[in-house]
Image (cartoon, rainbow, N blue to C red):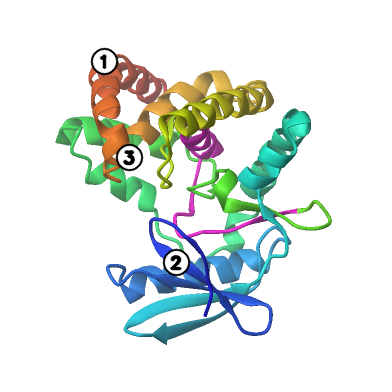
């Protein structure tokens, strides 16, 4: 099999009959992989945004999921080749995320609230602080689908310029501004897996700031943004810390230390109102 990509959880290979194999690293349990398979299978029956899901397979003591092969380009590559249309492309990117949030959550089974689990296990919060955040998450829950890892490397553009969204392992149901906040953070501050020269890193950083600016312009006028965005961004950043991204954790630690008291107080106020 020809390897065509790799991420933090798996490698992707060309498979037979116009399919691809997402082959997970051995550290990931069959339960985690089965959860992703079932979520993606269910989501794919409700929207054309998701590639078809076929089988779970076992190869060389590793487990993988067979997906429909998408003919097209990763959105991050597509953007680099269509710089003049960046604003238009990011508008569609934001609109696609809105479409995801509007999928009827009642039709989606086999998901667990991985996001709440990350808060429960956070190393940056005391038990009482975790309780405040978890109560806040319960209060703002709108039963909206959150992809959980929505960024330009998890979106593909097919030959018809339609978007296909991959990697549903982190999907959960909550308030769409958690997903929006994570997307904003990943675009603006997330670190790439690919090593680059200092010049390459600078160019990538500059591109990210432009994309983040256009993305913000698309989401800032949304209903509930003023109320939800900053607390959700704070929560997203707390959860990100436990992903152990070495290049980000020092900044995250300092950000949480600086903003924790203010953000928790804002969440407490919301709880008392309700």
Give the spatial CA distance, label 2 vs label 3.
Answer: 24 Å
Q: Which residue is mark 3?
A: 239
Q: Disc 1 or disc 2, which is closer to the eye?
A: 2
- Residue at the image position 73 percent from the left and 61 percent from the top: 48
From the viewer's perspective, is residue 8 above or below residue 69? Answer: above
Q: Disc 2 or disc 3, which is closer to the eye?
A: 2
Residue 3 appears at what percent x and percent y? 50, 70
Which quadrant holds the C terminus?
Answer: top left
Magenta segment boundaries in residue numbering: 163-188
Which circle marks residue 11 in the picture? 2
From the viewer's perspective, is residue 240 above or below residue 71? Answer: above
Q: Of label 2 and label 3, which has the lower sequence position?
A: 2
The quadrant holding residue 208 is: top right
Residue 226 appears at what percent x and percent y? 55, 18
Q: Which residue is mark 1?
A: 258
Q: Is residue 144 left or right of residue 233?
A: right
Q: Of label 3 and label 1, which has the lower sequence position?
A: 3
* In magenta segment, residue 181: yes
The quadrant holding residue 55 is: bottom right
- Residue at the image position 41 percent from the left and 25 percent from the top: 231
Give the spatial CA distance, label 1 vs label 2.
Answer: 37 Å
Q: How many marks?
A: 3
Residue 95 appears at what percent x and percent y? 71, 39
């Amino acid at each position: 099999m020809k390897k065509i990509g790799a991420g933090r959880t798996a490698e992707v290979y060309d498979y037979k009959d116009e399919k691809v194999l997402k082959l997970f690293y051995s550290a990931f349990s069959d339960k985690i992989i089965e959860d992703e398979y079932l979520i993606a299978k269910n989501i794919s029956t409700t929207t054309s945004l998701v590639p078809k899901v076929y089988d779970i397979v076992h190869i060389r003591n590793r487990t993988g999921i067979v997906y429909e092969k998408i003919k097209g380009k990763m959105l991050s590559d597509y953007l680099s080749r269509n710089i003049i249309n960046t604003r238009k492309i990011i508008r569609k990117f934001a609109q696609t995320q809105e479409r995801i949030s509007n999928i009827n959550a009642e039709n989606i089974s086999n998901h667990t609230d991985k996001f709440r689990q990350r808060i429960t296990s956070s190393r940056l919060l005391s038990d009482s602080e975790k309780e405040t955040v978890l109560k806040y998450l319960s209060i703002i829950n709108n039963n909206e689908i959150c992809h959980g890892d929505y960024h330009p490397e998890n979106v593909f553009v097919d030959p018809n310029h339609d978007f296909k969204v991959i990697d549903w392992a982190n999907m959960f149901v909550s308030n769409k501004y958690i997903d929006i906040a994570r997307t904003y953070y990943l675009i603006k501050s997330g670190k790439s897996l690919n090593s680059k020269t200092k010049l390459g890193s600078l160019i990538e950083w500059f591109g990210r700031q432009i994309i983040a600016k256009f993305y913000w312009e698309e989401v800032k006028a949304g209903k509930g943004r003023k109320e939800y965005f900053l607390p959700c961004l704070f929560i997203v950043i707390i959860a990100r810390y436990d992903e152990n991204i070495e290049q980000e954790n020092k900044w995250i630690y300092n950000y949480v230390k600086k903003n924790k008291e203010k953000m928790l107080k804002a969440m407490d106020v919301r709880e008392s109102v309700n």
